[in-house]
Amino acid sequence: MSNSSTSEREAILTFEDKKYDLKSMPKEVQELVKGMQVADAQLRMHEDTLKVLAVGRQHLAMQLKAKLDTINPIN
């Protein structure tokens, strides 16, 4: 789903390879589109958070490995 506007007066919704004039849609449809946009933004934000956490975890693992290299294992 993408919502692009070429001017303030024109709001085109592209959904499943079809284009719609968003401003001529019922209010309920416009609200659904807004909800989809919010959901998309939240997904992108959480995906970015997961990437940051993965990098942080990787760094912690590297630090742990460096520390454990100086310690004799029990087996």
Image (cartoon, rainbow, N blue to C red):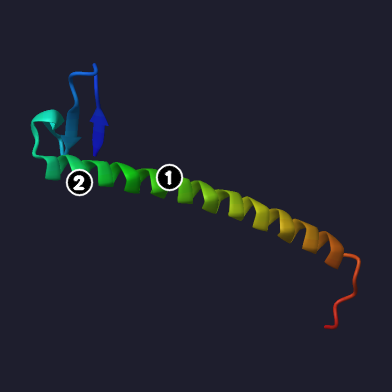
Q: Is residue 59 above or below residue 26?
A: below
Q: Quadrant of residue 22?
A: top left
Q: Is residue 56 above or below residue 74?
A: above
Residue 37, x across and y down, in percent: 30, 41
Q: Is residue 16 above or below residue 19?
A: below
Q: For marks 1 and 2, give the one nearer the viewer.
A: 2
**Separation of disc 1 and disc 2 at Cα?**
18 Å
Q: Are marks 1 and 2 in contact (CB under 8 Å)?
A: no
Amino acid at pointer 2: Leu
The residue located at (91%, 66%) in the rendering is 70
Q: Is residue 70 above or below residue 52?
A: below
Residue 24, x across and y down, in percent: 8, 30
Question: What kind of element bears circle 1?
Answer: helix
Q: Quadrant of residue 74?
A: bottom right
Query: Residue 59, labelled with which disc?
Result: none
The residue located at (60%, 54%) in the rendering is 53
Residue 29, x across and y down, in percent: 13, 43
Q: Judge the density around disc 2: few (<14), some (14-19), many (≥20) Cα neighbours within 10 Å.
A: few
Residue tagged 1? 44
Query: Residue 32, labelled with which disc?
Result: 2
Observer-nearest residue: 70 or 47? 47
The residue located at (79%, 62%) in the rendering is 65
Observer-nearest residue: 22 or 62? 22
Question: What kind of element bears circle 2?
Answer: helix
56 with respect to 67 (left or right): left
Mark earlier in primary sequence (1, 2): 2
Amino acid at pointer 1: Arg
Residue 73, x across and y down, in percent: 85, 77
- Quadrant that contains the C terminus: bottom right
For the view shown, which residue lies furthest in the bottom direction? 75
